[in-house]
Amino acid sequence: YLLVLAQLRSAASISLGNDHQSTTTSTALDSEFVVTVKDTQGNLVFGASVNFYIGFAPSGATPILSVTTGATTDTNGQAKTRLTLGSKNDVYVVRVNVNSVLDSYFTAYADGVDAPASEWSMWSPFVTPPAAGADPVATQLAGASGLIFYRWDESLASGAFKKYRAPAGQAGPNNAPNTFPSFESAKGYWVFNKNAATSFRVNGGTKVPDTDYYRVYVDVPGSGTWVQIGNPFAFWIDW
């Protein structure tokens, strides 16, 4: 008989895969969250205890995890779960705990933006929007019918609303005499909802890779100028 003695390696570090995803509300993310566990020598750890929890969700939302407690890492040192977002637009945080010692967090985002009734909001797309047609609101956004958009342009002549641009083809009330041809990532926009509360989102678009840097130009001619910029990534950044 051959007697084999195996020692379970102790988990020392964890790494996260497929973090920072986004999708529409009440929809499962495209990819599973993956946690990989290694020991102090960098070896993959098999059989580590892994638990997933909802760390944060908007009030009243009901996100769902495909795997919660009682998971163990496989021969690749991995454990996985898939998140289905709840019914509210906001950030969702999934906590992962390994062997009741190591903690980390996955983050996901609903790609919709709430537009409260009769209020101004500031918005910036966190994906690269698709190509625009003659009407950027209709071709680049979904659920934005009836919303009013403006973008500040310091280079324009002064006067009431004269330094603002509106998307081409925007219906009234539209007080901006100048237009812009398309919505762009890393740029900020004023949004006014003249109707009942609603939500809108970019119609498709392409995620900016997490590993990229993104250059935002603020060199508007003149001194002391104002520029509307936004975060192009699908996660919070510290400005």
Image (cartoon, rainbow, N blue to C red):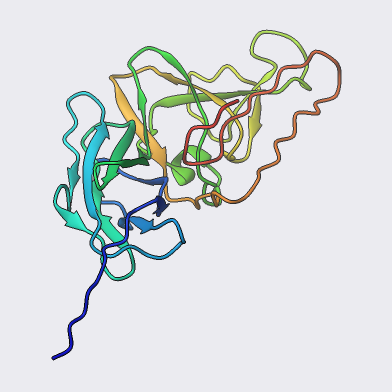
Rendered position, 18 above or below 26: below
In this rendering, would 239 be left or right of 200? right
Percent across and percent down for residue 147 are 42, 26
Q: Quadrant of residue 87?
A: top left
Residue 24 spot, x, y in % from top left: 31, 44
Q: Nearer the viewer, residue 48 or 108?
A: 48
Q: Nearer the viewer, residue 19 or 87?
A: 19
Residue 203 percent across, percent down from the top left = 42, 46
Left or right: where 234 falls relative to 226:
left
Residue 95 pos. (x, y %)? 29, 39
Number of marks drawn? 0
Q: Where the C terminus falls, by quadrant? A: top right
Residue 146 visible in the displayed image: yes
Viewport quadrant of the N terminus: bottom left
Name which residue lies at 77% across and 16% down: 225
Q: Quadrant of residue 202?
A: top left
Residue occupying image coordinates x 71% and y 17% = 226
Q: Say which of 202 and 71 sits in front.
A: 71
